[in-house]
Amino acid sequence: GGKAERRAAGGGKAERRATGGGKAERPIMGGGTPEQSYVFAPRPVPVRRGRQVGVVKAGRSYQVSFNIRPTAVAPGWRSVLHFTSSGNHVRAPAAWFFSGSTRVHIRASRQGNWNDGCDPKQHLPLHKTTKVTIRVAHGRMDVSYNRRLVCRSRKYHHPTVVRRPLKVFVGDPWYDQALASVSNVSYKQLTAGGGGRKESQEAKATARGLVP
């Protein structure tokens, strides 16, 4: 995390799919019912600066997941994924690679700090696919790799509530792109308090014995 941009790059369900081109090929936005789900880029697409793959309606509590396959490292902050309603200072959430590595820098705006987040210590393996899950609910941000909890922040009792639609970027317009491909970008709105009994059970199961 950090202060300015030098330190941080830092009832039912409906599912929609879109594939990514240079800009969104059919940006899609849903109705905003609780537990609305969206899936974009069902097949791997290279991360590219300014590549928009869709639009979603934001939830106060949410879960984002995606598959990523890094192919190389590069100097400087490298954008992986960014959900934003306007500019770089809306991060709902966003992810970068640290300079010269595949360690992921994850930010999600909250009241009092637009640039807070959680940075797992693990580096993602090159040429292998990792599923990254970011959940903001229950007053926490939880980050999992392949369903294993790798980072947790307990500062999210008041996450930023974004009223405008969120653009979904696989490589945002403000940073050079990560050298990687991404697929199955999922955004799920969670009900107030975290998503009900089923989701609470899943969260407990995921966290059991795995909290760092």
Image (cartoon, rainbow, N blue to C red):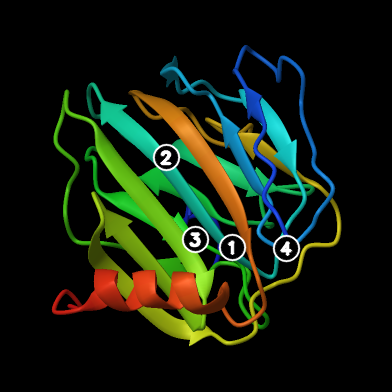
SS under mark 2: strand
Residue indicated by mark 2: 66
Of the numbered discs 3 and 2, the one sitting upstream in the chain is: 2
Q: Relative to 195, does residue 40 appear above or below in the rendering? A: above
> What residue type is disc 1 on?
Tyr
Are there few (<14), some (14-19), or many (20+) residues within 10 Å of tag 3?
many
Mark 2 and mark 1: Cα distance apart in space:
14 Å
Label 1 belongs to which residue?
A: 62
Residue 67, picture quadrant? top left
Q: Is residue 145 above or below residue 142?
A: above
**x and y, in percent, of residue 44 in the image:** 41, 18
Give the residue displayed 64% in from the left and 13% down from the top.
22
Q: Position of residue 123 (x, y in %)?
A: 17, 47
Q: Amino acid at mark 3?
A: Arg
Q: Earlier in the sequence, mark 4 or mark 2?
A: 4
**What SS does tag 1 mark?**
strand
Disc 3: which residue: 107
Please tell me how crowded label 1 is: few (under 14), some (14-19), or many (20+) other residues with Cα within 10 Å: many
Q: CA distance from mark 1 to mark 3?
A: 14 Å
Residue that carries the numbered disc 4 in the rendered image = 34
Of labels 1 and 3, earlier in sequence is: 1
Q: Earlier in the sequence, mark 1 or mark 4?
A: 4
